[in-house]
Image: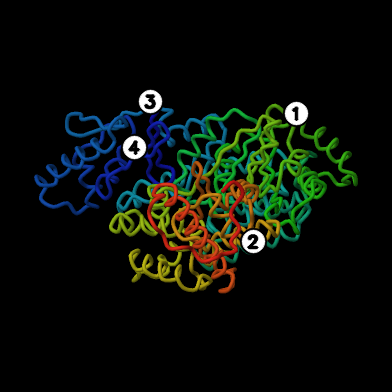
């Protein structure tokens, strides 16, 4: 049994990789407070002060309520319970490796700042509602993180990574404009990148800011750095290649994929393939996992969108290799693919490199980009299975749509736990209406955040109406998902497009291959269905198949009324003929009305 407690982001408890629900409200404040003081005594009085934000009711009643809160937390945690009673208070009994805050501090002590910062998943205890906790406790955690970030940047500057640090530092000075050390780092990075004028302009900017906001001059160290830049007295940067750090930002609200993250963590393969339908969150999962493990790959992280979902825009291996080589600071890239592959493999042969190859079309597009180093890792996302990468010992993760629980956790992360739990049934209905697709859920949640007066139940009714009406309503989740479907649909061969388009006319929750053949007007569509299953546009359930509701609406929109009428006429005629055949077999002596003559072609084998 493995238990993990997380406070560097939303409060989480994991038992063998599975999230454990922590009681909302006071229960979360109690657990958060005990975890922040892990293995240390916290008095009843201090807990009462925190839980009631300094305004407790009658103390005797508050103490009794606290005991009830403790009981509920222990019951909810079950095997993951860490709350122990000691005389006059409580403590959380935690092993150092179980709590992300303790691991963070250990890594900082070892000066492993990159892996330490990777443990942060968003604002500390961002989903715990407690004014006093966020006033008195959380700011100290934020300060620890910023100090670690400053030290990591200092180390990167010393290592000669000035060029790649400039965009990060520009963002940091916007976010923390009164933090002198970030301004000093930005000035130094700009100067060492050959941008002396920009470094001096940064000093003028912070000087004006401090004068306007605080009425003070920059600190002596910042003024001295400015003088050194003016006089050109700073030592030049070290002559070393710039380490690529190309990962897109991780989602602070990433949630609902805990079991999938655990599956990735358990893999020892050097090639990980994440497959699934468009909009299911393949890229988000790949980027999230890449950020989690980026500290293991100090020689760089490269991200390439291979655009495989669009056959007209899909990158050739040559184009992709050119991007990767430029990311590795190769000035003169060879023209031929063979030369590019040879140079690439030579450059990364001994490097600890992380490569994220997004939206791959097929194995042939990916294979030249796979690093040969035993200490490198490639994460590939695709709507197809990329089975050809089995030759490269790839691990395949088929990413399903979010379950009701997973989708609800995502909504809790975006909308807030209290709001979602107050409408638990409506939240689950919203997850289902959005097909468990994170893309649709995020857009629906964004609408709800922008409209405080709109309840989740209101959104469910609206989405249900839109789903049955106009699909492409601005801001509607179905409209957003249709864009993803457009890309997948346009990538299909014309005969497969025809089959998919007409499958939307099928009544019922699922269908057989024979149903599909009749509705499509073809003698056999098994090859077409295999294609659609492989690109995750059709789900196979044993001998039957299914379309998601949103995809069903999407495909019907692409059929004319006449095409739908003709398809349904063929289907119902087929059902009548099959029923008549069965009736003749079961009841040969009974009289039956003759069927009208039809021209419907029976599927092969019927």
How far separated are the C-alphas under marks 4 and 2?
57 Å
**Residue contact at pointers 4 and 1, CB within 8 angstroms:** no
How far separated are the C-alphas under marks 1 and 3?
36 Å
Tell me the residue at 49%/54% (across/down).
Answer: 578
Instruction: Please give the label number shown on residue 1.
Output: 3
Q: SS of the residue at dot 4?
A: helix
Write down the residue under mark 4: 35
For discs 3 and 2, the disc positioned in front in the rendered view: 2
Tell me the residue at 86%/47% (across/down).
Answer: 331
Q: Is residue 588 left or right of residue 78?
A: right
Q: SS of the residue at dot 3?
A: loop
In this view, the residue in front, 18 or 9, is: 18
Q: Is residue 5 above or below residue 496?
A: above
How far separated are the C-alphas under marks 4 and 1?
41 Å
Write down the residue under mark 2: 498
Name the image quarter holding residue 445: bottom left
Q: Earlier in the sequence, mark 1 or mark 2?
A: 1
Write down the residue under mark 1: 350
Mark 3 residue crowding within 10 angstroms, few (<14) / some (14–19) / many (20+): few
In this view, the residue in front, 236 or 95, is: 95
For discs 4 and 3, the disc positioned in front in the rendered view: 3
In this view, the residue in front, 133 or 476, is: 476
Quarter of the N terminus within the rendering: top left
For discs 4 and 2, the disc positioned in front in the rendered view: 2
List x then y, in percent, for residue 419: 32, 59
In this view, the residue in front, 117 or 477, is: 477
How far separated are the C-alphas under marks 1 and 2?
49 Å
How far separated are the C-alphas under marks 4 and 3?
19 Å
């Amino acid at each position: 049994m493995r238990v993990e407690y997380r406070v560097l982001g939303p409060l989480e408890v994991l038992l063998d990789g599975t999230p454990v629900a922590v009681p909302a409200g006071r229960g979360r404040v109690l657990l958060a407070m005990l975890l922040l003081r892990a293995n240390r005594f916290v008095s009843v009085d201090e807990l009462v002060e925190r839980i009631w934000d300094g305004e407790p009711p009658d103390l005797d009643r508050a103490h009794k309520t606290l005991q009830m809160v403790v009981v509920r937390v222990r019951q909810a945690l079950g095997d993951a319970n860490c709350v122990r009673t000691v005389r006059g208070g409580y403590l959380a009994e935690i092993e150092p490796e179980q709590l992300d805050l303790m691991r963070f501090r250990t890594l900082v002590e070892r000066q492993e700042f990159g892996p330490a910062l990777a443990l942060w998943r968003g604002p500390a205890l961002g989903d715990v509602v407690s004014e006093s906790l966020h006033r008195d406790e959380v700011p100290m955690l934020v300060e620890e993180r910023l100090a670690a970030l400053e030290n990591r940047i200092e180390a990167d500057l010393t290592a000669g990574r000035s060029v790649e640090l400039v965009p990060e530092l520009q963002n940091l000075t916007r976010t923390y404009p009164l933090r002198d050390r970030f301004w000093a780092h930005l000035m130094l990075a700009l100067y060492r990148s050959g941008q002396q004028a920009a470094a001096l302009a940064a000093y003028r900017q912070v000087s004006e800011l401090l004068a306007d906001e605080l009425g003070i001059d920059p600190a002596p160290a910042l003024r001295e750095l400015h003088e050194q830049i003016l006089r050109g007295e700073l030592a030049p940067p070290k002559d070393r290649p710039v380490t690529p750090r190309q990962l897109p930002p991780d989602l602070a609200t990433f949630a609902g994929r805990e079991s999938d993250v655990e599956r990735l963590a358990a893999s020892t393969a050097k090639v990980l393939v994440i497959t699934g339908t468009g909009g299911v969150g393949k890229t988000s999962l790949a980027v999230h996992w890449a950020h989690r493990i980026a500290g293991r790959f100090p020689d760089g992280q490269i991200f390439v969108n291979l655009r495989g979902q669009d056959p007209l825009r899909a990158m050739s291996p040559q184009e992709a290799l050119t991007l990767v080589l430029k990311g590795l600071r190769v000035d003169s890239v060879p023209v031929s693919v063979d030369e590019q592959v040879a140079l690439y493999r030579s450059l990364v042969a001994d490097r600890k490199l992380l490569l994220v190859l997004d939206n791959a079309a097929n194995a042939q597009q990916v294979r030249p980009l796979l690093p040969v180093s035993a200490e490198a890792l490639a994460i590939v996302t695709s709507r197809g299975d990329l089975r050809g990468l089995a030759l490269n010992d790839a691990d395949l993760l088929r990413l399903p749509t979010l379950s009701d629980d997973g989708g609800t956790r995502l909504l809790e992360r975006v909308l807030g736990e209290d709001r979602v739990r107050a409408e638990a049934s409506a939240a689950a209905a919203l997850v289902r209406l959005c097909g468990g697709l994170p893309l649709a859920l995020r857009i629906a949640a964004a609408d709800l955040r922008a409209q405080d007066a709109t309840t989740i139940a209101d959104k469910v009714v609206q989405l249900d109406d839109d789903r049955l009406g106009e699909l492409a309503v601005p801001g509607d989740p179905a409209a957003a998902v249709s864009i993803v479907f457009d890309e997948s649909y346009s990538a299909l061969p014309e005969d497969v497009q025809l089959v998919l388009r007409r499958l939307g006319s099928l009544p019922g929750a699922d269908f057989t291959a024979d149903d599909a053949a009749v509705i499509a007007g073809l003698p056999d569509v098994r090859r077409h269905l295999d294609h659609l299953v492989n690109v995750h546009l059709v789900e196979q359930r044993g001998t039957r198949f299914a379309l998601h509701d949103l995809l069903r609406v999407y495909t019907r929109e692409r059929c004319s009324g006449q095409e739908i009428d003709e398809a349904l006429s063929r289907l119902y005629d087929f059902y009548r003929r099959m029923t008549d055949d069965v009736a003749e077999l079961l009841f040969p002596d009974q009289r039956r009305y003759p069927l009208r003559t039809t021209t419907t072609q029976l599927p092969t084998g019927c």
